[in-house]
Image (tube, helix red, strand yellow):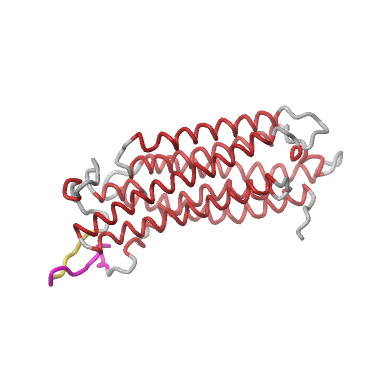
Amino acid sequence: MVHDITLDKAYLLALSVEAILYGAYAILFGLCVYLLFKRGARGAVNKPFLITAILAFTLNTGHIIVGIIRALQAFSDEGSSAIDYYNQSWLPLDIFRQVLMVTTTLVADIMVTYRCYLVWCCQWKVIVAPVILLVASSIAAFVSVYNFSQLKPGQPFLNSTNVNWGYASFILWLVTIVLITSLIVYRLRYIAQQTSEFLGEEHGNRYNYLVKVILESGIVYACSVLVLVILCIVRSVYQVIAFDAIAQITGITATLIIVRVGLGTITEGMPTDEHGSAIHTGRGRHRRVSIFNIHTSGSELGTMGPCESTSRVEDKAV
């Protein structure tokens, strides 16, 4: 049986876990920016993804800096113990840390929702439910932060009824993640089937790879939030570890999609030439097709929808 550790040790462990994740995130972010600008050399830079990626990384950097400052204050204050310090969740620095976490999650979810909107060829009706969930979860999260700021001395934050707003926001986050990921995967699977039927299995496989990448990232994100929800429900002190870890995981999962596709792994299983073009055979002769530049109209793919081309769907999705 696993017993809860003291609050000060939990926060130290949380800071250690977050530092490791932040190191991985920093590397991925550097690759992400490089690949976005590299693709921009062949056309326009995807500004929405670039801006959100920079914003998310900035917020996550601020989150871990605040965590370090809080740890220094907690263990250097001779007037009180570290446990007493960490129990004071109404302190401005802790409130700022929570605001950074909520804002980071909001930015990441907006980026995923925007990706879903583009994959569905800008059909706004598809994202009505995700947007409602996103707004509801954000409101619940910020209300929770406000309630924490109103706690009085002697009220342990893990046992306060105010955390119910936080629990609600986590559950809504989980539902939002599952819904948006499902919508994106369903749409890409549909495009893969249409593409395979009209252009051949080789082209359909690249969308199947996109499905794999997005699904894996979505599962990691969803499982992380699920662990946090469970720890919150059982009122375990380990929830502070999960909370700080998710601050970095949200950025990692979103950035990882861009990096994995941008590195050219989308041609997995397909031979390529020195220009990054996939070379395959069809009807007895060799054909060279760029993995990022296949222009096929929506009408040629039957009922794909109002998208300009299958390649546009792929480029916008990542």
Up/down of 313 relative to 2, above or below: above
Where is residue 141? Give x, y as percent.
Answer: 60, 34
The quarter of the displayed image where residue 273 is located = bottom left
Nearer to me, 249 or 232:
232
Where is residue 266? Give x, y as percent.
Answer: 34, 61
Nearer to me, 129 or 95:
129
- Magenta region: which residues? 272-284
Residue situated furthest top in the rendering: 150
Q: Which residue is depicted at the point 32% across and 56% down?
A: 207
For the N terminus, which image quadrant? bottom right
Where is residue 22? Give x, y as percent.
Answer: 57, 52
Up/down of 110 relative to 5, above or below: above
Q: Which residue is depicted at the point 21% across and 54% down?
A: 294
In this rendering, the count of numbered labels is 0
Q: Which residue is depicted at the point 84% across and 43% down?
A: 81
Up/down of 179 relative to 286, above or below: above
Residue situated furthest bottom in the rendering: 284
In magenta segment, residue 275: yes
Residue situated furthest left in the rendering: 284
Q: Which residue is depicted at the point 83% across and 33% down?
A: 154
Where is residue 298? Give x, y as percent.
Answer: 20, 46
**Residue 301 vs residue 54: left or right?**
left
In magenta segment, residue 93: no
Nearer to me, 1 or 106:
1
